[in-house]
Image (spheres, rainbow, N blue to C red):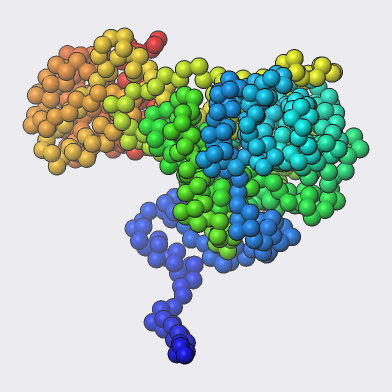
Amino acid sequence: MEKEKAPLPTVDFPGFTIPSYSEWKEEAITSLKGAPFEKKLLTKTYEGITLQPLYTAENAAAFTEKSNIPGGESYLRGTSAAGYSAKTWLIAQKGDTADPQKAHDMLREGLSKGVSAICFNPNCCPKLSNLQDIHLLLDGIDVLNFPFQVFCGAESTSTLALLAAYAKEQGVDSAAFYGVIGADPLGTLALQGTNCNSMASYYDQMANNLRFTALNMPLIKTIFIQSSVYHEGGANAIQELAAMFATAVSYLDALTERGLSVDSIAGSMVFSFSLGANFFMEIAKLRAARLLWSKIIAAYGGNEDSAKLDARAATSRFTTTVYDPYVNILRSATQAFSGIVGGVDALTVEPFDTALRHSDEQSRRIARNIQMMLENEFNLTTPIDPAGGSWFVETLTGQVIEATWEKLQQIEEDGGILQVLHNGTLQAEINATLQERFKKLSTRADHAVGSNMYANVEERGERREDRKTADACRGDHWSSTNCVCDHRSSANVGESETVTPISPHRWTEQFEALRIKTEAHTAKTGKNIEVFLANMGPLSQHKARADFSAGFMEVGGFTVLRNDGFADVAAAAWAAVASQAQATIICSTDDTYPEIVPELSRAIKAEAPQMLVILAGAPAPEFKNSYLEAGVDDFIHVKADCLSVLRKIQLAGGNDNE
């Protein structure tokens, strides 16, 4: 008989007391040695939320009451009490080819190697025009044992009709089809700036599709609301959520007016979120979305099932980079992780080379394996709402809920999503966020590894060949090349809508354009843009700023001419001029600059007036004017506008028209 184990002894720490927040703050202020607490330890997000350095139970008290339990009434912690342990998320993936046969091969490849949903874009990847195309795409695919996840753009009528005809030809019961084959005409309008038909005609189609599927494909959902248009336009999480739910509200209003019940409409809705780079914000966004949707459905009088948000997600295209593209694998992994922790029902991981070219077998395999590793090796099917109870996450979730609800109400007061798109106010707000993102990247307040930090100067950017089709095939995403106005669409009914489009961007596109210009200059002239380091004094005196300057310049793809340092100004000036570089950077210490900089700058300008002279380090205010008067053209330091400085050097090299 096994001996009964003794109970574990009680463990306490009598020598330690739990400090209050004010006590902790006092210690933190002391450790900052005079630096302002708010400036150093508080962080403001693009959503306007100020992140604290420390969270306590008191911070989260106002929000944890809303959390309830997983599967509880608010659904904030998940729509199922069992989480992924009962049903794991769907692994979605779609090829990016316009050829139906190649799309079929990619689909079969994915489904045989871990993908668990049938995904394609019928408007372009491939473009499905007739039954022959459907046969090329789906023959040999087990259409009854895999759910569909298909985004159709502005309308899904033609795709539903083709699939119904295909099922009849194959002797398959279309009532067994399940998943989503959906449209989002408002989202398509926001992206493209125009639709073929009036919104009223699209709403009529949506109503007819709901009635058709209720009779013929009852397990198919037909409304697929996308956030990618807003996310890729630069929107923050609040703008993204508010736009999506304002869209959902418009559909609820329009379709109830056409005689459909709230529950049938809501039951046919699927939401696809883009997963950005702010790990905890993305978790909070998904958790907040579930509560917000349950709140909206409650206001419309819907039932409990209707209040359960069907949340799909895809990793961000906005954060993918052309240079150092393998870093995109790491970005995708963390974004996928945030989506799973946030509780998505299906997930698409974009191939790492999506900004470069059409995906290949390797990049698609890596994308699939990221999800399969998270599921099988990291056991993320086990914890249920693993972020729940975190004082930080609960507080952040609550803040996202409150800010989104306020923004949603503002949109409704302004006439709804269609009206604010016509007014251009939403586009202007999103563009303001985009410009803020660009500015922070330009000044390197935000870091994009391989692009504005730690660039590989030996790398040459791969040209993006014929990206139209690939850009249109974005998992559940789409682009301005989406073909919604073709012969398969219904006849034009009423006047088409026209708004200012929200164009897709990538956060590093400006730095990539800079690198491409540098490469074009090299190809044209046979010589790269060069920057000479005027390192003054011994290694210990100039090394820190020389290393910083080299990294700064390599972001532009420039060649940095290094040396071991100069003992005197005359030797440094001679070497700088002899280098025939486009710019010289003076590297030393603040203490030596007043003596060195004016003399060295004047000496360089006297022999090479076209050469830019740049000083490494922010100048002391009392010396700045004297440096400028001596010929210093600019200063580089941790707060400098990296993009502007590099552009100035390109212009000095005659690289303004390539």
Residue 271 is situated, as x and y percent measured from the top left of the image, at 68, 41
Residue at screen point 44% across, 36% down: 328
Q: Is residue 280 above or below residue 64?
A: above
Seen at 58% across and 32% down, the residue is 107
Q: Is residue 549 visible?
A: yes
Residue 49 point in image, percent of width and height: 57, 48
Q: Nearer the viewer, residue 388 or 305?
A: 305
Is residue 641 visible in the rendered image? The answer is no
447 up-or-down from 578: above or below: below
Residue 502 horizontal side relative to residue 571, left or right = right
- The C terminus sits in image quarter: top left
* Residue 187 found in image quarter: top right
Residue 564, given in percent of the width and then of the height, sits at 11, 32
Q: Residue 468, located in which quarter of the rendered image?
A: top right
User: Residue farthest to the front?
Assistant: 171
Residue found at x 52% / y 40%: 113
- In the image, taking residue 438 as reference, residue 239 lies left or right, namely right
Q: Which percent across, then down, holds residue 133?
A: 67, 21
Residue at 25%, 31% in the rendered image: 550
Front-most of residues 198 and 7: 7
The image quarter containing residue 619 is: top left
- Of all residues, the one furthest to the right in this rendering is 259
Give whichever of 26, 274 is nearer the camera.
274
